[in-house]
Image: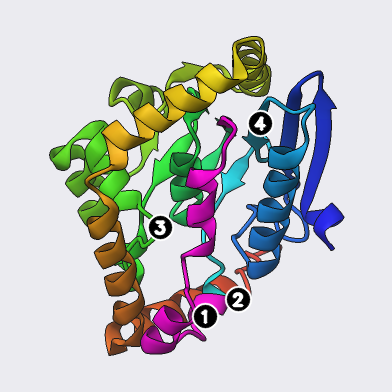
Protein backbone atom coordinates (compact mmCIF):
# COMPACT_ATOMS: atom_id res chain seq x y z
CA UNK A 1 0.00 0.00 0.00
CA UNK A 2 2.78 2.48 0.88
CA UNK A 3 4.13 2.40 -2.67
CA UNK A 4 0.72 3.65 -3.86
CA UNK A 5 0.59 6.48 -1.33
CA UNK A 6 4.11 7.84 -1.89
CA UNK A 7 6.92 7.63 -4.40
CA UNK A 8 10.60 7.92 -3.56
CA UNK A 9 13.53 8.91 -5.78
CA UNK A 10 17.06 10.19 -5.37
CA UNK A 11 18.77 13.12 -7.02
CA UNK A 12 22.35 12.76 -5.89
CA UNK A 13 22.38 13.35 -2.15
CA UNK A 14 18.75 14.57 -2.15
CA UNK A 15 15.88 12.18 -1.37
CA UNK A 16 12.58 13.27 -2.95
CA UNK A 17 9.44 11.88 -1.28
CA UNK A 18 6.22 12.61 -3.14
CA UNK A 19 2.66 12.02 -1.95
CA UNK A 20 0.97 10.60 -5.03
CA UNK A 21 -2.67 11.59 -4.56
CA UNK A 22 -3.62 7.90 -4.38
CA UNK A 23 -5.91 6.36 -3.45
CA UNK A 24 -7.63 9.70 -2.86
CA UNK A 25 -6.97 13.01 -4.57
CA UNK A 26 -5.76 15.55 -2.07
CA UNK A 27 -3.56 13.24 0.01
CA UNK A 28 -5.78 13.20 3.12
CA UNK A 29 -3.68 12.33 6.15
CA UNK A 30 -4.90 8.82 6.83
CA UNK A 31 -3.08 6.57 9.31
CA UNK A 32 -1.72 4.70 6.28
CA UNK A 33 -0.28 7.84 4.68
CA UNK A 34 1.15 8.92 8.03
CA UNK A 35 2.93 5.60 8.45
CA UNK A 36 4.19 5.66 4.86
CA UNK A 37 5.60 9.17 5.28
CA UNK A 38 7.26 8.43 8.59
CA UNK A 39 8.71 5.21 7.19
CA UNK A 40 10.14 6.91 4.10
CA UNK A 41 11.51 9.82 6.11
CA UNK A 42 13.06 7.49 8.68
CA UNK A 43 14.76 5.52 5.90
CA UNK A 44 16.16 8.76 4.48
CA UNK A 45 17.51 9.71 7.89
CA UNK A 46 19.56 6.51 8.24
CA UNK A 47 20.79 6.41 4.64
CA UNK A 48 24.33 7.80 4.67
CA UNK A 49 24.02 8.82 1.01
CA UNK A 50 21.11 11.15 1.74
CA UNK A 51 22.00 14.62 3.01
CA UNK A 52 18.66 16.43 2.63
CA UNK A 53 15.03 15.66 1.78
CA UNK A 54 12.29 17.25 -0.33
CA UNK A 55 8.68 16.45 0.58
CA UNK A 56 6.16 17.15 -2.18
CA UNK A 57 2.56 16.46 -3.14
CA UNK A 58 0.78 16.57 -6.46
CA UNK A 59 0.55 19.72 -8.62
CA UNK A 60 -2.92 20.45 -7.19
CA UNK A 61 -2.67 19.24 -3.59
CA UNK A 62 0.15 19.05 -1.07
CA UNK A 63 -2.08 17.55 1.64
CA UNK A 64 -5.63 18.36 2.77
CA UNK A 65 -5.10 17.21 6.34
CA UNK A 66 -6.90 14.69 8.48
CA UNK A 67 -9.31 12.23 6.93
CA UNK A 68 -12.58 13.29 8.57
CA UNK A 69 -13.96 9.78 8.31
CA UNK A 70 -11.22 8.75 10.74
CA UNK A 71 -11.63 11.86 12.92
CA UNK A 72 -15.37 11.28 13.30
CA UNK A 73 -14.63 7.95 14.99
CA UNK A 74 -12.31 9.39 17.62
CA UNK A 75 -13.12 9.95 21.28
CA UNK A 76 -11.11 12.69 22.95
CA UNK A 77 -9.86 10.94 26.08
CA UNK A 78 -8.95 7.78 24.21
CA UNK A 79 -7.23 9.85 21.52
CA UNK A 80 -5.03 11.42 24.18
CA UNK A 81 -4.18 8.05 25.69
CA UNK A 82 -3.39 6.64 22.25
CA UNK A 83 -0.98 9.48 21.50
CA UNK A 84 -3.13 10.93 18.71
CA UNK A 85 -1.19 13.66 16.85
CA UNK A 86 2.09 12.67 18.52
CA UNK A 87 3.54 10.64 15.65
CA UNK A 88 4.10 13.40 13.11
CA UNK A 89 5.88 15.48 15.74
CA UNK A 90 8.82 13.14 15.23
CA UNK A 91 9.37 14.83 11.85
CA UNK A 92 10.48 17.98 13.63
CA UNK A 93 13.15 16.05 15.49
CA UNK A 94 14.59 14.23 12.46
CA UNK A 95 18.32 14.90 12.00
CA UNK A 96 18.41 15.95 8.33
CA UNK A 97 16.87 19.03 6.69
CA UNK A 98 13.44 18.60 5.09
CA UNK A 99 12.06 21.07 2.55
CA UNK A 100 8.32 21.11 1.79
CA UNK A 101 7.49 21.76 -1.87
CA UNK A 102 3.90 23.02 -1.70
CA UNK A 103 1.70 23.26 -4.78
CA UNK A 104 -2.07 23.61 -4.65
CA UNK A 105 -3.75 23.10 -1.29
CA UNK A 106 -2.02 22.67 2.07
CA UNK A 107 -5.02 22.61 4.38
CA UNK A 108 -5.44 21.79 8.06
CA UNK A 109 -3.03 19.03 8.98
CA UNK A 110 -1.48 19.40 5.52
CA UNK A 111 -0.49 22.97 6.36
CA UNK A 112 0.83 21.74 9.69
CA UNK A 113 2.80 19.00 7.92
CA UNK A 114 4.51 21.68 5.83
CA UNK A 115 5.23 23.64 9.01
CA UNK A 116 7.04 20.60 10.46
CA UNK A 117 9.61 20.95 7.68
CA UNK A 118 12.67 23.19 7.96
CA UNK A 119 11.71 25.26 4.92
CA UNK A 120 8.67 25.73 2.70
CA UNK A 121 8.86 26.50 -1.02
CA UNK A 122 5.38 27.55 -2.12
CA UNK A 123 3.73 27.97 -5.47
CA UNK A 124 2.65 31.59 -5.85
CA UNK A 125 -0.95 30.40 -6.15
CA UNK A 126 -0.73 27.72 -3.43
CA UNK A 127 -3.50 27.86 -0.82
CA UNK A 128 -2.72 27.54 2.88
CA UNK A 129 -5.53 27.31 5.45
CA UNK A 130 -6.45 26.08 8.93
CA UNK A 131 -10.23 25.66 8.56
CA UNK A 132 -10.80 23.37 11.56
CA UNK A 133 -12.98 25.73 13.61
CA UNK A 134 -15.57 25.58 10.82
CA UNK A 135 -16.18 21.90 11.55
CA UNK A 136 -16.08 22.24 15.33
CA UNK A 137 -12.48 21.22 16.05
CA UNK A 138 -9.08 22.94 16.27
CA UNK A 139 -5.67 22.45 14.74
CA UNK A 140 -3.70 20.11 16.97
CA UNK A 141 -0.36 19.47 15.29
CA UNK A 142 1.39 22.71 16.10
CA UNK A 143 -0.41 24.94 13.62
CA UNK A 144 -1.35 27.68 16.05
CA UNK A 145 1.95 27.72 17.92
CA UNK A 146 4.21 27.61 14.87
CA UNK A 147 2.15 30.19 13.00
CA UNK A 148 2.44 32.60 15.92
CA UNK A 149 6.19 32.09 15.91
CA UNK A 150 6.49 32.65 12.17
CA UNK A 151 3.85 35.22 11.29
CA UNK A 152 2.81 36.73 14.63
CA UNK A 153 -0.31 36.50 16.75
CA UNK A 154 -2.54 38.67 14.54
CA UNK A 155 -2.03 36.63 11.35
CA UNK A 156 -2.29 33.33 13.23
CA UNK A 157 -5.54 34.44 14.89
CA UNK A 158 -6.93 35.61 11.53
CA UNK A 159 -6.24 32.28 9.83
CA UNK A 160 -7.37 30.09 12.73
CA UNK A 161 -10.49 31.99 13.81
CA UNK A 162 -11.83 32.95 10.37
CA UNK A 163 -10.46 30.03 8.35
CA UNK A 164 -9.34 32.30 5.52
CA UNK A 165 -6.82 31.08 2.97
CA UNK A 166 -3.36 32.47 2.28
CA UNK A 167 -1.77 32.40 -1.13
CA UNK A 168 1.81 31.27 -1.52
CA UNK A 169 2.87 34.88 -2.07
CA UNK A 170 1.16 35.94 1.17
CA UNK A 171 2.75 33.01 2.99
CA UNK A 172 6.18 34.22 1.88
CA UNK A 173 5.41 37.82 2.81
CA UNK A 174 4.34 36.72 6.30
CA UNK A 175 7.50 34.66 6.82
CA UNK A 176 5.76 31.27 6.59
CA UNK A 177 7.30 30.22 3.28
CA UNK A 178 10.95 30.83 2.46
CA UNK A 179 10.28 31.28 -1.25
CA UNK A 180 7.27 31.67 -3.57
CA UNK A 181 7.72 30.71 -7.22
CA UNK A 182 5.53 29.70 -10.17
CA UNK A 183 3.92 26.28 -9.75
CA UNK A 184 6.07 24.73 -12.48
CA UNK A 185 9.24 25.73 -10.60
CA UNK A 186 8.34 24.63 -7.07
CA UNK A 187 9.81 21.14 -6.98
CA UNK A 188 12.98 22.07 -8.87
CA UNK A 189 13.49 25.10 -6.60
CA UNK A 190 13.11 22.90 -3.52
CA UNK A 191 15.54 20.35 -4.97
CA UNK A 192 18.03 23.11 -5.76
CA UNK A 193 17.85 24.33 -2.16
CA UNK A 194 18.26 20.76 -0.89
CA UNK A 195 21.29 20.28 -3.16
CA UNK A 196 22.85 23.48 -1.84
CA UNK A 197 22.36 22.22 1.72
CA UNK A 198 23.79 18.81 0.78
CA UNK A 199 27.02 20.44 -0.40
CA UNK A 200 27.65 22.02 2.98
CA UNK A 201 29.22 20.48 6.08
CA UNK A 202 26.81 17.85 7.43
CA UNK A 203 27.81 18.36 11.10
CA UNK A 204 27.59 22.14 10.73
CA UNK A 205 24.14 21.88 9.13
CA UNK A 206 22.97 19.53 11.89
CA UNK A 207 24.19 21.84 14.65
CA UNK A 208 22.81 24.92 12.90
CA UNK A 209 19.39 23.27 12.73
CA UNK A 210 19.53 22.53 16.44
CA UNK A 211 20.28 26.19 17.16
CA UNK A 212 17.41 27.33 14.92
CA UNK A 213 14.97 24.87 16.49
CA UNK A 214 15.98 25.85 20.00
CA UNK A 215 15.55 29.53 19.22
CA UNK A 216 12.19 29.08 17.50
CA UNK A 217 10.61 26.32 19.57
CA UNK A 218 12.42 25.92 22.85
CA UNK A 219 9.75 27.78 24.80
CA UNK A 220 6.83 26.28 22.86
CA UNK A 221 6.93 22.70 24.09
CA UNK A 222 4.39 23.23 26.87
CA UNK A 223 2.11 25.19 24.55
CA UNK A 224 2.28 22.42 21.95
CA UNK A 225 1.31 19.87 24.59
CA UNK A 226 -1.69 21.97 25.64
CA UNK A 227 -2.70 22.41 22.00
CA UNK A 228 -2.70 18.64 21.45
CA UNK A 229 -4.73 17.99 24.59
CA UNK A 230 -7.39 20.56 23.70
CA UNK A 231 -7.54 19.36 20.09
CA UNK A 232 -8.37 15.90 21.41
CA UNK A 233 -10.84 17.06 24.08
CA UNK A 234 -12.88 19.12 21.61
CA UNK A 235 -13.56 15.94 19.61
CA UNK A 236 -16.03 14.89 22.29
CA UNK A 237 -18.25 17.97 21.94
CA UNK A 238 -21.67 17.68 20.35
CA UNK A 239 -20.77 20.57 18.05
CA UNK A 240 -17.79 18.70 16.64
CA UNK A 241 -19.72 15.49 16.07
CA UNK A 242 -22.58 17.36 14.39
CA UNK A 243 -20.44 19.54 12.15
CA UNK A 244 -18.16 16.72 11.03
CA UNK A 245 -21.20 14.54 10.33
CA UNK A 246 -22.84 17.30 8.31
CA UNK A 247 -19.65 17.88 6.34
CA UNK A 248 -19.31 14.20 5.48
CA UNK A 249 -22.98 14.00 4.46
CA UNK A 250 -22.60 16.97 2.12
CA UNK A 251 -19.46 15.49 0.62
CA UNK A 252 -21.12 12.14 -0.07
CA UNK A 253 -24.42 13.58 -1.38
CA UNK A 254 -25.05 13.06 -5.10
CA UNK A 255 -24.18 16.16 -7.11
CA UNK A 256 -27.02 17.77 -9.11
CA UNK A 257 -26.88 16.80 -12.78
CA UNK A 258 -28.69 19.83 -14.20
CA UNK A 259 -31.43 19.98 -16.83
CA UNK A 260 -30.35 18.27 -20.05
CA UNK A 261 -33.60 18.84 -21.94
Image quadrant for the N terminus? bottom right
Numbered mark located on residue 141 in the image: 3
Name the residue at 30% across, 80% down.
233
Disc 1 is placed on an element classified as helix
- Which residue lies under the disc numbered 4? 53
Q: Which mark is residue 249?
A: 1
- Please give the range of residues in magenta: 70-99
Q: Position of residue 186 (x, y in %)?
A: 61, 22
- The image quadrant that residue 7 belongs to is top right
Q: Earlier in the sequence, mark 4 or mark 2?
A: 4
Residue at 44% in and 88% down? 78
N-term-proximal mark, 2 vs 3: 3
Residue under label 2, please give it. Answer: 252
Q: Are marks 4 and 2 in contact (CB under 8 Å)?
A: no
- Residue depicted at 63% across the width and 60% down the height: 34
The Cα–Cα distance between marks 4 and 3, rounded to whole angstroms, is: 21 Å
Q: Is residue 245 magenta?
A: no
- CA–CA distance between discs 4 and 2? 36 Å
Amino acid sequence: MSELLISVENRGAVRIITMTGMPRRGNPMSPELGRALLGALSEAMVDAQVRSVVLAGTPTHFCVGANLVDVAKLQGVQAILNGWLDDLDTIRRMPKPIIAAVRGYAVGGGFELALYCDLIVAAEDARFALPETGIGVIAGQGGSQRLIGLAGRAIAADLILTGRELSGVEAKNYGIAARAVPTSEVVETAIGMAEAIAQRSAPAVAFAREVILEASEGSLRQSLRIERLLAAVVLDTTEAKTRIGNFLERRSAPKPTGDRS
